[in-house]
Image (cartoon, rainbow, N blue to C red):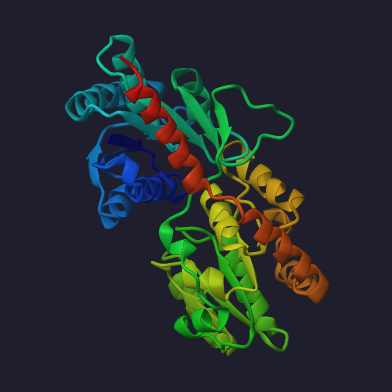
Amino acid sequence: MKVLLTGGGTGGHVYPAIAIAEALAEEAALAPLEVLFVGMRDGLERQMVAKAGLRARFVSAAPLARKFSPAIFTLLANVVGFFQAHAVLLGFRPDVAIATGGYVTFPVIVALWTAKVLRLSRARIALLEPNARAGLTNRLLRPLVDEIWFGVAEPGRALASNEHLTGTPVRAEFLRPLSAPDARLALGLEPGATTIVVFGGSQGARSLNEAVTRLASQGLPPGWQVLLVSGERDFDGVERRIAAAGSARVRVVRYLDDPRPAFAAADLVVARAGASTLAELAATGTPALLVPYPYATDDHQTENAAVVERAGAARVIADRDLSELRLRTELEAALSPQTLAALRDAAHARAASDPRRAIVARVKSWMSQKAGQP
């Protein structure tokens, strides 16, 4: 079976594609399996996909709604990407195409849909929508795909016959069992301390870094320790200020190649509310304090966070309200034994579903239908 994956721009779009590739590769019924990832050469996906060992091709694309990008540039970039994608598709001839989000998916899926209209392809197309509110690209692509897979249910909306609630898959590394004390030791932390892990995604989050730095300068409550994943941009300044504050119980790292130990180590995670982060929290059953990124497209992170909050697995602070005092107050409330137990129970309930298995089941269903065709 040949599977084409396309997505890019952020880890939240690329990591689910990598997770899907891993899950499909584990399914004997789909062998022999060929996977091709199509993204942008200058996007984050280039490094991520290469590290995952996936074959990749690259096409041109531009955001469909970028205010500072002239319309003619957007049009030309996507037209070029359309023809580049068309050439890739005719050479690879996928049985299945799965788009995981990001503006690069637009020329790729339009090219595949056009090939199907011209009877040059019979590939089935799926669109994974990991966020509670779809972005412009995914809204435009919905009529062109065979199925839509949702990471979370859209509030108050019934699913159509070609829509399925699968959840957002995570990479296999998140599924490995790891005890909290072992994880803390591996990260250079005290194995018995109450552990708070703070990170703002692959690029870091300045408001989170600032609040934690100020909190450290005021002194952590007894028994607490913090692992702050600052991102490359702020690392030097944050590390210098933490050292000046003399806070030995705050450890700052640039980035975690394998974030699984951080989730295992955490009593509580403080994070943005990107779809990939929320999927990782769900897979590991980790309670959270979420601070949605306020400038995300259509404010979709606020809606993402609200879904987890309604499930009882997280508390939420608006970024505009974040300060060292508010952070300390929210952490003290969340880490109280009764509240933390309730958050943990709800988080473990979210971990009961298996998006990887749900997506593999959808692909196998398509393959069985194809096998039954004359």
Relative to 128, residue 118 above or below:
above
Is residue 183 at all visible to an observer of this figure? yes
Of residues 284 and 291, the one nearer the viewer is 284
Residue 39 in percent (x, y) is at 31, 39
Relative to 358, residue 161 above or below:
above
- Residue at image coords 30%, 36%: 3
- Residue at image coords 72%, 63%: 345
Residue 362 in percent (x, y) is at 46, 34
Q: Is residue 83 left or right of residue 305?
A: left
The quadrant where residue 349 appears: bottom right
Is residue 73 at all visible to an observer of this figure? no
- Residue at image coords 27%, 18%: 121
**Going by the picture, which residue comes out furthest to the left?**
91
Of residues 161 and 338, the one nearer the viewer is 161
The quadrant the N terminus occupies is top left
Of residues 365 and 201, the one nearer the viewer is 365
Residue 46 in percent (x, y) is at 28, 48
The quadrant the C terminus occupies is top left
Residue 264 in percent (x, y) is at 55, 72
Please give the count of numbered marks on the rendered protein. 0
The quadrant where residue 210 appears: bottom right
Relative to 203, residue 163 above or below:
above
